[in-house]
Image: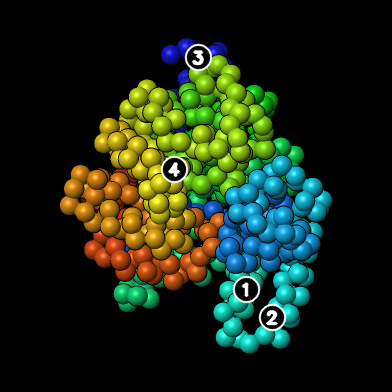
Amino acid sequence: MSYTSEQISFIERATERISENPISRLGAITKSTLERNNFVIDAHCHIFDSDCINVSYLATRMISGAPEALKSWVWRLITGEKMGYEKNILSHLELLENLYKNPDLIPDENVDKFIERIETELNSMEVELKTYDNKSTSVFPKRELIIRYRNIIRLLSTKRMSDVYVTFRDRYAINNVINNAYDTDKELVTIVLGMDLNSGWKGSINKSNSQQNDELGKLPQAYPVIPFLPIDPRRADDEGEGNLYNLFLKAFDVDFPSFFGVKCYPSLGYLPSDSRLKPIFEICEKKRIPVLTHCGGESVSTFQNPIIVNRNGIEESISLRPRAARARYLNEPREWLEVLRTHKDLKLCLGHFGSGGAWEDPEDVRAHRIPTIFKMMEEFNVYADFSFNLESQKATDNFINKLTQKNWEGELMRDRTLFGTDFWVILPMSNLNLDQANFIKKIGGLRDNLTNTNILKYLGIDNILNHSKQIENAST
């Protein structure tokens, strides 16, 4: 495998400066929580605030999360205008396509002004609903959505990831759900994933990528959090501290490691086979750094059309239509096969297990991903989390049916599936506590597999209890 002089230098420095022991990358609070051996883990969580996103991202999440019956109502909430007939007949996906093609549909304002205007609109809608019968079937879902959107806005307005995390921990975390249902006292450990929208949507995010990484990387000093560094190959072309390789070296340095794993989001405009990522994956394999990639829906993607990507150093143009098809191409699990064949010991988690749509409907355009993922699990160190999909009863039931089957696929799932929520992204679509409670009840005795055992194996720290006992014995 050929590398540039910069990449060779990076590999040499990373080999010297990054530990091969994953336990050494855990914060002291996280480590002590795990050693007490009375915990559950959420393997897929986001805690970015309003300065980590922009208006387009928030609008996208609000539209994609709205029930069909409230589509026009949410359009008014976002744009400030009533939805005309020509848009009212569009699907959620088509509405998103409209936003991507015509960003002027969203008022030209920063995210703070956008949130302030939405708050005002929510108050106005709430007053309107007071004139209706509380039990009206058309009124209840609007009230429910008002509550969900208001909760999201208040989360985002804190301006601090730590505040978003504390709200998650206190109000939505899986350990609370389990403790309430089973009268236990489980502690929470959370895998928190960064997201580099700055690179994919240039110039529109208030906090720089470095600022977000610094804030996220400090969380383990105060909370049992396992942070994953967002990477984007295009940052290899940046200078100074913002350079991809410099960001990586700082994040995993043996003296002060602030991150544990790596997060990829290909639909923002790149492929995992990008030549600029090759030395990153070589070090991830060598140093036992797990990688998690988005492998779900296409709501969030690059605005570029066509998308120009790097495949093994060669430019490739992706000009599929519509936008969602281009994003879906980048999200395909098969795009990771070359990486895995080159780095056979790399730990990879496919976030969202192909998407809720793939689990809901065998005719869905993403349904082929599920057998592809099973084959990847058979051949490589591949895992998948079922995050976000809890909001779909049908997807959840189909997933649990497959999980409990006495065949090779069910066996793989019981050994390689991780539990995750996709907080806070899931909040517009889900009564999260109720959906978690239903899910945990349905998986029954497999709860520990998905919320503990499998996640520790994926992270490469399943020996942490033995490790702590060895240290204790050595000290005595």
Using the image, tell me which numbered label, if any, was put on residue 129.
2
Question: Is 384 situated above or below 448?
Answer: above
Q: Earlier in the sequence, mark 4 or mark 1?
A: 1
Residue under label 1, please give it. 142
| Image marks 1 and 2: residues in contact by CB distance under 8 Å | yes
Q: Secondary structure at mark 3?
A: loop
Q: Residue at x 33, y 55 (%)?
A: 399
Q: Is residue 44 visible?
A: yes
| Image marks 2 and 4: residues in contact by CB distance under 8 Å | no
Residue under label 4, please give it. 366
Q: Residue at x 66, y 51 (%)?
A: 95
Residue under label 3, please give it. 3
Q: Secondary structure at mark 1?
A: helix
Q: Earlier in the sequence, mark 1 or mark 3?
A: 3
Measured from the top left, where is residue 82 in percent x and y? Answer: 77, 63
Q: Earlier in the sequence, mark 4 or mark 3?
A: 3
The crowd level at tag 2 (other Cα within 10 Å; few <14, some 14-19, many 20+) is some
Tell which of 238 and 59 is nearer to you.
Answer: 59
Q: Type of residue at label 1?
A: Lys
Q: Secondary structure at mark 2?
A: helix
Q: Earlier in the sequence, mark 1 or mark 2?
A: 2
Q: Type of residue at label 4?
A: Arg
Tell which of 362 and 130 is nearer to you.
Answer: 362
Q: Type of residue at label 2?
A: Leu
Tell which of 227 and 58 is nearer to you.
Answer: 58
Question: Is 236 situated above or below 438?
Answer: above
Q: Earlier in the sequence, mark 2 or mark 3?
A: 3
Gap in Å between the C-alphas at discs 1 and 3?
Answer: 55 Å
Look at the image and tell me in which quarter the N terminus lies: top left
